[in-house]
Image: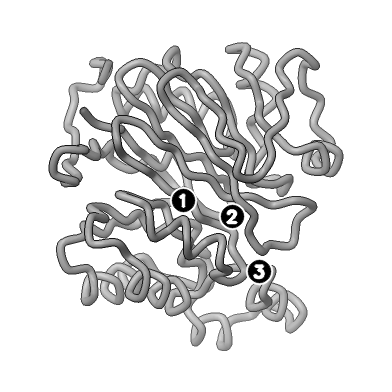
Protein backbone atom coordinates (compact mmCIF):
# COMPACT_ATOMS: atom_id res chain seq x y z
CA UNK A 1 0.00 0.00 0.00
CA UNK A 2 1.17 3.51 -0.82
CA UNK A 3 0.60 7.17 -0.23
CA UNK A 4 0.87 9.41 -3.28
CA UNK A 5 2.55 12.80 -2.99
CA UNK A 6 3.14 15.71 -5.33
CA UNK A 7 3.95 19.39 -5.13
CA UNK A 8 1.35 21.17 -7.25
CA UNK A 9 3.31 24.41 -6.88
CA UNK A 10 5.99 25.59 -4.48
CA UNK A 11 7.38 29.09 -4.04
CA UNK A 12 6.46 32.65 -3.12
CA UNK A 13 4.15 32.72 -6.16
CA UNK A 14 1.99 29.99 -4.62
CA UNK A 15 2.11 26.82 -2.56
CA UNK A 16 -0.03 23.71 -2.84
CA UNK A 17 0.88 20.16 -1.83
CA UNK A 18 -1.01 16.91 -2.48
CA UNK A 19 -1.08 13.79 -0.28
CA UNK A 20 -3.49 10.93 -0.92
CA UNK A 21 -4.17 7.21 -0.86
CA UNK A 22 -6.25 5.10 -3.24
CA UNK A 23 -9.54 6.57 -2.04
CA UNK A 24 -9.08 10.10 -0.74
CA UNK A 25 -6.62 12.97 -0.71
CA UNK A 26 -5.98 16.32 0.92
CA UNK A 27 -4.31 19.52 -0.16
CA UNK A 28 -2.04 21.43 2.16
CA UNK A 29 -2.61 25.06 1.16
CA UNK A 30 -4.15 26.37 -2.06
CA UNK A 31 -1.95 29.28 -3.06
CA UNK A 32 -2.50 29.11 -6.82
CA UNK A 33 -5.74 29.46 -8.73
CA UNK A 34 -8.36 26.74 -8.83
CA UNK A 35 -7.90 26.55 -12.60
CA UNK A 36 -4.16 25.92 -12.23
CA UNK A 37 -4.72 23.28 -9.56
CA UNK A 38 -7.22 21.52 -11.82
CA UNK A 39 -4.91 21.70 -14.82
CA UNK A 40 -1.85 20.43 -12.99
CA UNK A 41 -3.66 17.59 -11.28
CA UNK A 42 -5.13 16.52 -14.60
CA UNK A 43 -1.67 16.48 -16.20
CA UNK A 44 -0.45 14.30 -13.33
CA UNK A 45 -3.34 11.85 -13.58
CA UNK A 46 -4.66 12.87 -10.15
CA UNK A 47 -8.43 12.89 -9.76
CA UNK A 48 -9.65 16.12 -8.17
CA UNK A 49 -12.77 14.23 -7.09
CA UNK A 50 -10.59 12.34 -4.62
CA UNK A 51 -9.93 15.57 -2.72
CA UNK A 52 -11.79 15.57 0.60
CA UNK A 53 -10.33 18.57 2.45
CA UNK A 54 -7.85 21.45 2.37
CA UNK A 55 -5.63 22.32 5.33
CA UNK A 56 -4.27 25.87 5.63
CA UNK A 57 -0.88 26.51 7.22
CA UNK A 58 -1.21 30.30 7.58
CA UNK A 59 -2.84 33.35 6.01
CA UNK A 60 -0.17 34.65 3.62
CA UNK A 61 -1.54 35.06 0.10
CA UNK A 62 0.80 32.51 -1.49
CA UNK A 63 -0.95 29.85 0.60
CA UNK A 64 -4.61 30.86 0.21
CA UNK A 65 -4.94 32.60 -3.18
CA UNK A 66 -7.06 29.89 -4.81
CA UNK A 67 -8.82 28.69 -1.70
CA UNK A 68 -12.20 30.41 -1.94
CA UNK A 69 -12.88 29.22 -5.48
CA UNK A 70 -11.74 25.61 -5.15
CA UNK A 71 -13.50 25.16 -1.81
CA UNK A 72 -16.78 26.55 -3.16
CA UNK A 73 -16.61 24.76 -6.53
CA UNK A 74 -15.98 21.31 -5.07
CA UNK A 75 -17.58 21.88 -1.65
CA UNK A 76 -14.33 21.06 0.09
CA UNK A 77 -14.10 21.63 3.83
CA UNK A 78 -11.30 23.99 4.85
CA UNK A 79 -9.42 23.23 8.06
CA UNK A 80 -8.07 26.49 9.44
CA UNK A 81 -7.47 28.08 12.84
CA UNK A 82 -9.69 31.00 13.93
CA UNK A 83 -6.78 33.45 14.07
CA UNK A 84 -5.60 32.43 10.61
CA UNK A 85 -9.11 32.82 9.24
CA UNK A 86 -9.50 36.23 10.85
CA UNK A 87 -6.19 37.40 9.42
CA UNK A 88 -6.84 36.05 5.95
CA UNK A 89 -9.79 38.14 4.76
CA UNK A 90 -11.22 34.95 3.22
CA UNK A 91 -14.93 34.67 2.53
CA UNK A 92 -15.58 30.97 2.86
CA UNK A 93 -18.92 29.23 3.03
CA UNK A 94 -19.74 28.90 6.71
CA UNK A 95 -20.58 25.19 6.52
CA UNK A 96 -17.18 24.45 4.97
CA UNK A 97 -15.11 26.06 7.73
CA UNK A 98 -13.56 23.52 10.09
CA UNK A 99 -11.24 24.28 12.99
CA UNK A 100 -8.09 22.38 13.89
CA UNK A 101 -5.77 22.52 16.90
CA UNK A 102 -2.15 21.50 17.27
CA UNK A 103 -1.60 17.80 17.90
CA UNK A 104 -5.29 16.96 17.56
CA UNK A 105 -5.35 14.44 14.64
CA UNK A 106 -8.17 14.82 12.11
CA UNK A 107 -9.39 11.77 10.18
CA UNK A 108 -10.07 12.32 6.48
CA UNK A 109 -11.22 8.87 5.44
CA UNK A 110 -8.23 6.66 6.11
CA UNK A 111 -5.82 9.61 6.24
CA UNK A 112 -4.90 11.19 9.56
CA UNK A 113 -3.78 14.84 9.41
CA UNK A 114 -1.98 16.35 12.40
CA UNK A 115 -0.98 19.99 12.73
CA UNK A 116 1.90 21.25 14.84
CA UNK A 117 3.20 24.77 15.61
CA UNK A 118 6.11 26.35 13.78
CA UNK A 119 7.97 29.67 13.81
CA UNK A 120 6.87 32.06 11.06
CA UNK A 121 5.65 35.66 10.87
CA UNK A 122 1.95 34.84 10.68
CA UNK A 123 -0.97 34.84 13.11
CA UNK A 124 -0.97 31.17 14.07
CA UNK A 125 1.26 29.18 11.71
CA UNK A 126 1.29 25.39 11.57
CA UNK A 127 2.94 22.62 9.62
CA UNK A 128 1.40 19.19 9.09
CA UNK A 129 1.97 15.49 8.93
CA UNK A 130 -0.32 13.16 7.01
CA UNK A 131 -0.48 9.50 8.04
CA UNK A 132 -1.92 6.57 6.14
CA UNK A 133 -1.10 2.99 5.21
CA UNK A 134 1.66 2.95 7.83
CA UNK A 135 3.39 5.96 6.20
CA UNK A 136 3.93 9.48 7.49
CA UNK A 137 4.40 12.46 5.15
CA UNK A 138 5.62 15.82 6.46
CA UNK A 139 4.84 19.22 4.96
CA UNK A 140 7.35 21.62 6.52
CA UNK A 141 7.64 24.96 4.76
CA UNK A 142 7.62 28.64 5.81
CA UNK A 143 9.78 27.92 8.85
CA UNK A 144 12.02 30.53 10.45
CA UNK A 145 14.05 27.97 12.34
CA UNK A 146 13.91 24.27 13.09
CA UNK A 147 12.21 24.37 16.48
CA UNK A 148 11.64 21.24 18.56
CA UNK A 149 8.16 20.72 17.02
CA UNK A 150 9.69 20.62 13.54
CA UNK A 151 12.59 18.37 14.58
CA UNK A 152 10.45 15.80 16.37
CA UNK A 153 7.95 15.54 13.52
CA UNK A 154 10.64 15.43 10.82
CA UNK A 155 12.24 12.47 12.62
CA UNK A 156 9.08 10.43 12.01
CA UNK A 157 8.60 11.08 8.29
CA UNK A 158 9.00 8.53 5.52
CA UNK A 159 8.90 11.41 3.04
CA UNK A 160 8.74 15.18 3.44
CA UNK A 161 8.34 18.50 1.72
CA UNK A 162 11.05 20.63 3.35
CA UNK A 163 11.70 24.32 2.84
CA UNK A 164 15.09 25.38 1.48
CA UNK A 165 14.29 29.01 0.75
CA UNK A 166 17.53 30.89 0.21
CA UNK A 167 21.27 30.71 -0.29
CA UNK A 168 23.07 32.99 2.17
CA UNK A 169 25.46 34.49 -0.37
CA UNK A 170 22.77 35.09 -2.97
CA UNK A 171 20.65 36.85 -0.35
CA UNK A 172 23.63 38.94 0.80
CA UNK A 173 24.57 39.96 -2.74
CA UNK A 174 21.04 40.49 -3.99
CA UNK A 175 18.99 43.64 -4.30
CA UNK A 176 16.49 43.11 -1.49
CA UNK A 177 16.32 45.97 1.04
CA UNK A 178 17.93 45.39 4.42
CA UNK A 179 14.64 45.04 6.29
CA UNK A 180 13.48 42.28 3.93
CA UNK A 181 16.76 40.40 4.18
CA UNK A 182 16.47 40.62 7.96
CA UNK A 183 12.89 39.37 7.87
CA UNK A 184 13.84 36.38 5.69
CA UNK A 185 16.75 35.47 7.98
CA UNK A 186 14.86 35.93 11.22
CA UNK A 187 13.63 33.10 13.45
CA UNK A 188 10.17 33.79 12.02
CA UNK A 189 11.24 34.00 8.38
CA UNK A 190 12.47 31.15 6.20
CA UNK A 191 14.99 28.31 6.31
CA UNK A 192 18.21 28.74 4.36
CA UNK A 193 19.70 25.91 2.34
CA UNK A 194 22.17 25.09 5.09
CA UNK A 195 19.63 25.34 7.90
CA UNK A 196 17.48 22.85 6.00
CA UNK A 197 20.52 20.67 5.30
CA UNK A 198 21.42 20.65 8.99
CA UNK A 199 17.92 19.45 9.87
CA UNK A 200 18.16 16.77 7.18
CA UNK A 201 21.63 15.51 8.13
CA UNK A 202 21.08 15.51 11.89
CA UNK A 203 17.50 14.29 12.11
CA UNK A 204 16.62 12.33 8.97
CA UNK A 205 15.23 8.92 9.96
CA UNK A 206 16.85 5.87 8.38
CA UNK A 207 13.56 5.05 6.64
CA UNK A 208 13.12 8.42 4.89
CA UNK A 209 12.82 7.48 1.23
CA UNK A 210 12.06 10.85 -0.33
CA UNK A 211 12.71 14.55 0.23
CA UNK A 212 11.12 17.31 -1.85
CA UNK A 213 12.96 20.60 -1.38
CA UNK A 214 10.31 23.31 -1.36
CA UNK A 215 9.55 27.04 -1.32
CA UNK A 216 12.78 28.07 -3.06
CA UNK A 217 13.19 31.82 -3.53
CA UNK A 218 13.17 32.93 -7.15
CA UNK A 219 15.82 35.61 -6.52
CA UNK A 220 17.89 34.18 -3.69
CA UNK A 221 18.28 30.51 -4.56
CA UNK A 222 19.03 28.20 -7.46
CA UNK A 223 17.46 24.75 -7.96
CA UNK A 224 20.71 23.28 -9.29
CA UNK A 225 22.65 24.62 -6.32
CA UNK A 226 20.34 23.23 -3.66
CA UNK A 227 20.01 19.90 -5.49
CA UNK A 228 23.80 19.54 -5.51
CA UNK A 229 24.16 20.48 -1.83
CA UNK A 230 21.59 17.95 -0.67
CA UNK A 231 22.58 15.18 -3.07
CA UNK A 232 26.04 15.08 -1.52
CA UNK A 233 24.42 14.04 1.77
CA UNK A 234 21.34 12.18 0.56
CA UNK A 235 22.48 8.59 0.95
CA UNK A 236 19.53 6.36 0.05
CA UNK A 237 17.02 9.22 0.23
CA UNK A 238 15.82 10.43 -3.16
CA UNK A 239 16.05 14.24 -3.30
CA UNK A 240 14.06 16.36 -5.76
CA UNK A 241 13.38 20.09 -6.04
CA UNK A 242 9.78 21.32 -6.18
CA UNK A 243 9.19 23.93 -8.87
CA UNK A 244 7.51 27.32 -8.71
CA UNK A 245 6.38 26.90 -12.33
CA UNK A 246 4.86 23.42 -12.56
CA UNK A 247 3.83 20.35 -10.66
CA UNK A 248 6.33 17.68 -9.69
CA UNK A 249 6.02 14.04 -10.59
CA UNK A 250 3.67 12.00 -8.45
CA UNK A 251 5.59 9.70 -6.12
CA UNK A 252 4.26 6.54 -4.49
CA UNK A 253 5.69 6.11 -1.00
CA UNK A 254 5.38 2.44 -0.14
CA UNK A 255 5.05 1.13 3.40
CA UNK A 256 6.55 -2.27 2.75
CA UNK A 257 10.03 -1.09 1.83
CA UNK A 258 9.93 2.72 2.19
CA UNK A 259 11.03 3.24 -1.39
CA UNK A 260 9.72 6.19 -3.38
CA UNK A 261 9.07 5.52 -7.03
CA UNK A 262 8.13 7.98 -9.74
CA UNK A 263 4.74 7.36 -11.34
CA UNK A 264 4.42 7.81 -15.11
CA UNK A 265 0.88 7.93 -16.45
CA UNK A 266 -0.79 8.84 -19.72
CA UNK A 267 -2.17 12.36 -19.41
CA UNK A 268 -5.83 11.28 -19.24
CA UNK A 269 -5.38 8.32 -16.88
CA UNK A 270 -6.24 8.69 -13.20
CA UNK A 271 -4.09 7.11 -10.51
CA UNK A 272 -7.21 5.86 -8.86
Q: Indicate which label's residue lies in the foreground, 3 or 2.
A: 3
CA distance for labels 1 and 3 = 19 Å
For residue 228, side relative to residue 120 (left or right): left
Which residue lies at the image location 44% right of the left edge and 74% below the top edge? Answer: 193
Quadrant occupied by the C terminus: top left
In the rendered structure, find residue 189 and report the number of the disc placed on it. 3
Q: How crowded is mark 1: few (under 14 residues within 10 Å), some or many (20 or more)?
A: many
Which residue is labeled 2 in the image? 12
Q: In this view of the protein, which residue sits in the foreground, 179 or 155?
A: 155
Q: Mark 1 points at which residue?
A: 244
Residue 20 higher or lower than 176, as above or below: above
Residue 88 versus residue 206 in the image, above or below: above
Viewer-proximal residue, 104 or 79?
104
In the displayed structure, would residue 150 be above or below residue 129? below
In the depicted view, which residue is nearer to us: 165 or 83? 83
The image quarter in which residue 149 lies: bottom right
Q: Is mark 3 on a helix, strand or loop?
A: loop
> Whole-percent x and y of residue 2?
24, 31
Q: For the residues carrying marks 1 and 3, which lies nearer the camera in this image?
A: 3
Q: Are marks 3 and 2 in contact (CB under 8 Å)?
A: no
> Do the residues under discs 1 and 2 have CB atoms within 8 angstroms?
yes
Query: Residue at (77%, 79%) from the top-left corner?
Result: 179
- Please tell me which of labels 1 and 2 falls first in the chain: 2
Please give the name of the residue rendered at 67% of the width and 37% of the height, measured from the top-left corner: 65
Which mark is first along the chain, 2 or 3?
Answer: 2
Amino acid sequence: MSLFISSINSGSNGNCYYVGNNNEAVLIDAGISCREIEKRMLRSGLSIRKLKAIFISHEHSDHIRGLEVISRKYQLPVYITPRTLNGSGLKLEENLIKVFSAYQPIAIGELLVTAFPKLHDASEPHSFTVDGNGIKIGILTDIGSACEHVIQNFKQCHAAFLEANYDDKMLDDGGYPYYLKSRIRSDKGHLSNYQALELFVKHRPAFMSHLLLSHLSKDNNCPHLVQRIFSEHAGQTHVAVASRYKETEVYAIRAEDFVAEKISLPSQMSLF
